Image: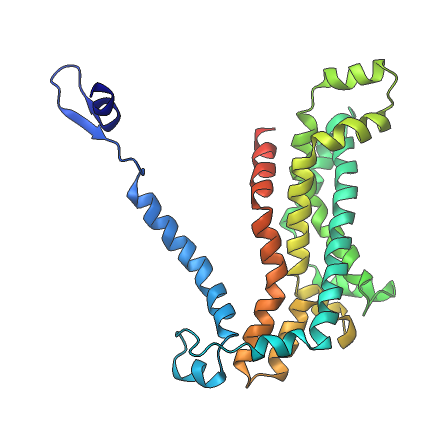
Amino acid sequence: MSAAISTSTKYTAKNGYRLSSKTPWGNPAVYFFSLVLVAICVTPVLYIIFGGFRTNSQITNDPAGLPNPWVIDNYVEVITSDIFWGELVNSLIVGISTMIGVVVLGIMVSFVIARYRFRYAPLMYALFSAGLMFPMTVGITPLYLMIRNLGLSNSLAGIILPQIAFGLPQTIIILVPFLQSIPMELEEAALLDGCSRLGFFARMVIPLSMPGVATTGILTFVGSWNSYMLPLFVLSSDSKYTLPLGVQMFSSEHSVDTARVLAFTSLAMLPALICFTIFQKKIVGGLTGAVKG
């Protein structure tokens, strides 16, 4: 009885008046605003997915309604088309290559900044941090001219290399705290046992920093998958299009067929959505570890 009273109410020691009460589900206002935010984020995605199962007449007569009846022809036509699969392969090549390049270069640079003691280490870290203040949108014109002069226009390499460069600042900012949190005593013990710096990096640093590596890799892949502006400037051949650019071109060619455009759009965003949903705990854990470090 006393335990139930202590968990449900609190009383003052002086006069016994109740100060506050605890509900088993927490503050209802927090849940309300959380549900509102979830609805704001999820509703457009559900509208696109369900819209692909409708006909154009259904969308015209009842834009906010559910499919009645459900139609799968739009998704079947998109899946059986060579255009979608070609753009999917291009997006996978760009996303995976960008992710590998950013992670490999980022962890090597972060190791030097975090573990080597030299005068310009803080300056290098500040320089990479400043890179976050210059998005790709600001420098897209000179970047395109550089890509063209290097002979990388209308090629996937012309997308991968700039995305690696713009993805490094975020990766280094996340990974440096991870590497700094590794005790120096551990490195000294490894060196006394005859392990070189490269061996310490491969055997100890990489395994211990895997939460941060996973976080940066997933964020880089999702960002590369959703990239639109750079492919728009660099690519000119239909066979080299990535999915974000292919969605825009597909919607322009089939502007009257709204249901089919929605089906194409939902299939285009599905891989990144699945990837982010599966690995969301790793992303949160990696960011939390970076903040603690």
- Left or right, 271 with respect to 59, comes to right
At 64% from the left and 76% from the top, the residue drawn is 78
Coloring scheme used? rainbow
Q: Is residue 213 above or below residue 202?
A: below
Q: Is residue 58 above or below residue 175?
A: below
Q: From the top left corner, tell me how far across and down residue 27 is, in percent.
A: 30, 39
Q: From the top left corner, tell me how far across and down residue 83 is, in percent.
A: 72, 76
Q: From the top left corner, tell me how far across and down residue 210 is, in percent.
A: 69, 36
Of residues 75 and 260, the one nearer the viewer is: 75
Quadrant placement of the N terminus = top left
- Left or right, 170 with respect to 104, comes to left
At 65% from the left and 77% from the top, the residue drawn is 249
Of residues 179 and 28, the one nearer the viewer is: 28
Q: From the top left corner, tell me how far across and down residue 270 is, in percent.
A: 60, 62
Q: Is residue 192 above or below residue 27?
A: above
Q: Give the quadrant of residue 148.
A: bottom right
> Looking at the image, which residue sits at the far left?
15
Q: Is residue 253 above or below residue 287?
A: below
- Left or right, 85 with respect to 8, comes to right
